[in-house]
Image: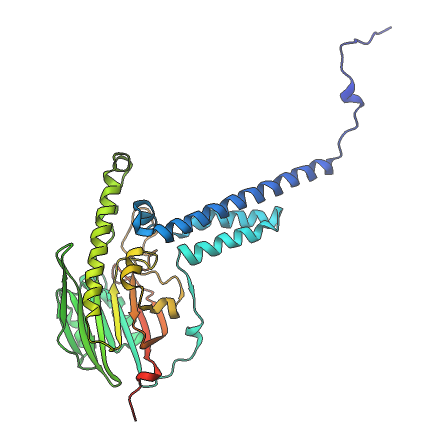
């Protein structure tokens, strides 16, 4: 007769097997908990990123470098978590949608104006203006000129316009032009002689101002080209960050660029008082820059007022870590004084230069209409 060993544990054999659906339910609860936890942490991280970028901006070297990086990759975790929440935990979808909204609006600087859907009527007080850094009309100014032809501007504001191609003046035959130190302003209306702003931080001209005689009265136009933020940012590396030289270089050039912007704004502020003023050009700063806000925050931004999407204008040149001809910064702007209202603003579609153009339709407000 066989004997049963007293050392064999038969409790597992006697315990009933857990039903399969119970195991699945436990696993599903685990996935729901992890989805909620990671979504919450991601929202907190995004909120911290927004606060650092907007509150510190170029006052701190790290956030100053951050605002010049592509912002759309920050969407990847939130989009992936949104997919997980739709499968495992629907309530977490709200957390991820909030993260996506913060990134699109606060970091990517997306705009969703309804003004472009309104029909624009020519009231006689409209000004159609285009600005573009033409990079000495290379590599394919024909693409830029094609967009100029489509938009039919009244005023054209160009930066880095040194050797002017014959095709430009042939196409805009009969226009009036002012051209100094790479700044160029053209208009179908009469222009005054341009005055140049020379700033001391980098010992270079940064703006030119002209007066345009529109049918509704004089309009001051400032053509701006400020120093690029690549000065300082290109000094950042693992070694330079560890030894402190990289952050010091970023802070130093941020100070110089801030002073350059202040001197340029002071020049533009001394234009004739009470005259409607448009300031356009390559500011080399997004609107999230504290330098931009300090010097030009008093003006209305045409794309903020009447743009849709992101309006990215640069860089269009090949970049090692990014897709070709896909800009990720909105650093070219059209600003207006309080006497003007923006009806429409959009960025160009083609990369005929290192920057895409910005076009806007602005209108003198009713109180500035000429007397009958």
Colouring scheme applied when the structure was drawn: rainbow
Q: Does residue 236 lie above or below 276 as drawn? A: above
Residue most extreme to the right? 1
Asked whether the viewer can see residue 70, the reply is no
| Picture quarter with the N terminus | top right
Q: Which quadrant of the view contains residue 361?
A: bottom left
The residue at 17%/76% (across/down) is 170
| Residue 168 percent location from the top left of the image | 19, 72
| Residue 89 percent location from the top left of the image | 62, 47
| Residue 339 percent location from the top left of the image | 31, 77
**Relative horizontal placement of residue 27, taking residue 239 as reference (left or right):** right
Question: In this figure, what is the number of numbered marks?
Answer: 0
Residue most extreme to the top? 1
Residue 116 vs residue 291, the one in the foreground: 291
**Relative horizontal placement of residue 88, taking residue 16 as reference (left or right):** left
Residue most extreme to the bottom? 372
Residue 24 vs residue 208, the one in the foreground: 208
| Residue 9 percent location from the top left of the image | 76, 15
Residue 143 vs residue 28, the one in the foreground: 28
Asked whether the viewer can see residue 50, the reply is yes
The residue at 46%/45% (across/down) is 45
| Picture quarter with the C terminus | bottom left
């Amino acid at each position: 007769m066989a004997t049963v060993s007293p050392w064999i544990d038969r409790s597992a054999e006697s315990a009933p097997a857990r039903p399969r659906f119970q195991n699945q339910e436990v696993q599903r609860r685990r996935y729901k908990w992890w989805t909620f936890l990671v979504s919450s942490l991601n929202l907190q991280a995004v909120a911290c990123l927004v606060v650092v970028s907007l509150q510190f901006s170029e006052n701190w070297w790290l956030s100053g470098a951050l605002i010049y990086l592509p912002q759309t990759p920050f969407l990847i975790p939130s989009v992936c978590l949104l997919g997980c929440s739709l499968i495992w935990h629907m309530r977490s979808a709200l957390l991820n949608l909030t993260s996506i909204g913060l990134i699109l609006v606060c970091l990517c600087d997306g705009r969703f104006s309804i003004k472009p859907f309104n029909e624009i009527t020519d009231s006689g007080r409209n000004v159609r203006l285009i600005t573009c850094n033409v990079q000495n009309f290379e590599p394919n100014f024909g693409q830029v000129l094609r967009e100029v032809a489509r938009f039919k501007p009244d005023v054209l504001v160009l930066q880095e316009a040194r050797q002017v191609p014959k095709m430009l003046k042939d196409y805009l035959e009969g226009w009036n032009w002012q051209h100094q130190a790479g700044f160029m302003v053209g208009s179908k209306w009469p222009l005054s002689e341009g005055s140049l702003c020379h700033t001391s931080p980098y010992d270079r001209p940064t703006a030119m101002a002209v007066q345009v005689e529109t049918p509704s009265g004089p309009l001051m136009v400032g053509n701006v080209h400020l120093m690029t933020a690549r000065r300082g940012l290109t000094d950042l590396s693992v070694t330079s960050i560890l030894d402190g030289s990289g952050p010091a270089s970023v802070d130093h050039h941020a100070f110089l660029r801030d002073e350059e912007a202040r001197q340029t704004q002071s020049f533009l502020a001394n234009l004739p008082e009470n005259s409607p003023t448009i300031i356009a050009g390559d500011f080399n700063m997004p609107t999230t820059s504290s330098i931009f806000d300090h010097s030009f925050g008093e003006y209305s931004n045409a794309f903020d007022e009447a743009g849709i999407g992101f309006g990215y204008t640069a860089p269009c040149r090949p970049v090692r870590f990014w897709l070709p001809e896909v800009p990720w910064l909105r650093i070219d702007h059209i600003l207006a004084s309080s006497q003007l209202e923006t009806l429409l603003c959009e960025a160009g579609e083609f990369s005929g230069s290192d920057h895409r153009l910005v076009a806007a339709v602005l209108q003198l407000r009713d109180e500035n209409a000429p007397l009958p």
